Amino acid sequence: MFDTLSDRLGQTIKKLRGQGRLTEDNIKDTLREVRMALLEADVALPVVKQLIDAVREKALGQEVIGSLSPGQALIKVVNDELVNVMGENAVPLNLATQPPAVILMAGLQGAGKTTTVGKLAKYLKEREKKKVMVVSCDVYRPAAIKQLQTVATGVEATFFESQVDQQPVAIAEAALAAAKKQFVDVLLVDTAGRLAIDTEMMAEIKQLHSALTPIETLFVVDSMTGQDAANTAAAFGEALPLTGVVLTKTDGDARGGAALSVRVITGKPIKFIGSGEKSDALETFYPDRIASRILGMGDVVSLVEEVTAKVDHDKAEKFAKKMQKGRAFDLNDLKEQLEQMASMGGMAAMMDKLPGMANIPEAAKAQVNDKQFVHMIALVNSMTPQERRFPAILKGSRKKRIAAGAGLQVQDVNKLLKQHQQMSRMMKKMKGGGMKKMMRGLQGKMPPGMGGPGGMPGM
């Protein structure tokens, strides 16, 4: 997400380096390029104007303080205004009501409502420790009810059954009654979508809202539709008292125009962003962290939170103890490490949150392919327990059998074994204080400014 905008803003700000002060001339040229970058990212025109005017007002004639360069000073101004445009603070779900708290999901067909209901159910169960029930009031789309049942089963949420011959309002009222009887904390209501906004659709969802009086009414919108996402949300906002927006498919959105436009156009906060099909691919929307990502400064806080929430700490502790005792790093260990990384969205998702990724050449980024992890795990799964523990026994015939079992080539097995050998050597170096030795060995190889002599932190 935001790749296009990040690249353009990064190039623009680089041009200011070496100048001692932000002046009217260099600001004028820079803002012209920032405006073009925002428009190319499909940010709504009123939002572009608001952002550019605010940056101009704050940046003109600003003295460079301490060691800050004009480029860094402008980054600070742009960062502050991006945060301002997107809403400044994260707005959590409001569940402060007599249970069950009803959350009504609205949006056009294909926006990802049903998938989002599943993700939100998992989020509420795991993060908020709530008992969650889901129900589908979509009696028009073929298999919509069955799809939600499948999603609910996957995240272990209670599913309230409905039929296509029932009226949506009747389904909603029956689900609410059942939720009260079963002492459910949150009832998530999936509604019908349309290919476009129409009178019939709006009338139906108004009736549902009136029957349920939800504490939260969330508009689910495909971020890849750009500023149209904001305009559609505004149209729904006129018909319904929306409390927030969920942006979906952000992993396929290189522009990011919707994230920058929705708050200004609708006046409603973005509460979550979805970035994939997996049930845990839902993040709270933090404007300051998103602004940091846009400007190529990463989002370390979210990365740490993700690691804390998704890493299996018992497995991690066992692995650490095993390495400390000097036991061999086998292929079972490699598989566990790959699975832990996959649970956090893979390397691509992690790189998006790391600072400085905007400066990495595209060719290098392209080499990070999460499919390789899937292939490596498949190869290990194709091995016997003995082969996993003792990789040295893997010779020609065994390699052919393993490759065939995973639907891959013998050269893929060789790549896996090479990767394992490299990681095994690294683990040996980390044993018994070897981590410090390894870090000292890297001194002088990192860029200055990272601390310690030669750029590495002092040990």
Image (tube, rainbow, N blue to C red):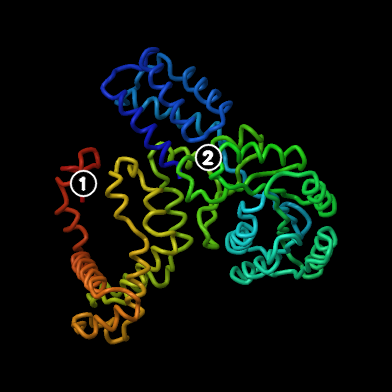
Q: Circle 1: is it few (<14), some (14-19), or many (20+) Cα within 10 Å? A: many
Residue drawn where x is 62% and y is 67% of the image: 151
User: Quick one: SS at disc 1?
Assistant: loop
- Left or right of 104? Residue 76 is left
> x and y percent of residue 78 in the render?
45, 28
- Left or right of 88? Residue 23 is left
From the image, which quarter does the N terminus lie in? top left
Q: Is residue 128 above or below residue 443?
A: below
User: Quick one: SS at disc 2?
Assistant: helix
| Residue in the foreground of this view, choosing between 95 and 432 | 95
Q: Is residue 283 above or below residue 266?
A: below
Residue drawn where x is 37% and y is 13% of the image: 25
> x and y percent of residue 332 in the render?
32, 77
What's the residue type where badge 2 is placed? Answer: Pro
Residue drawn where x is 24% and y is 77% of the image: 327
Residue on which the image places disc 1: 456
Residue on which the image places disc 2: 287
Q: Is residue 123 visible?
A: yes
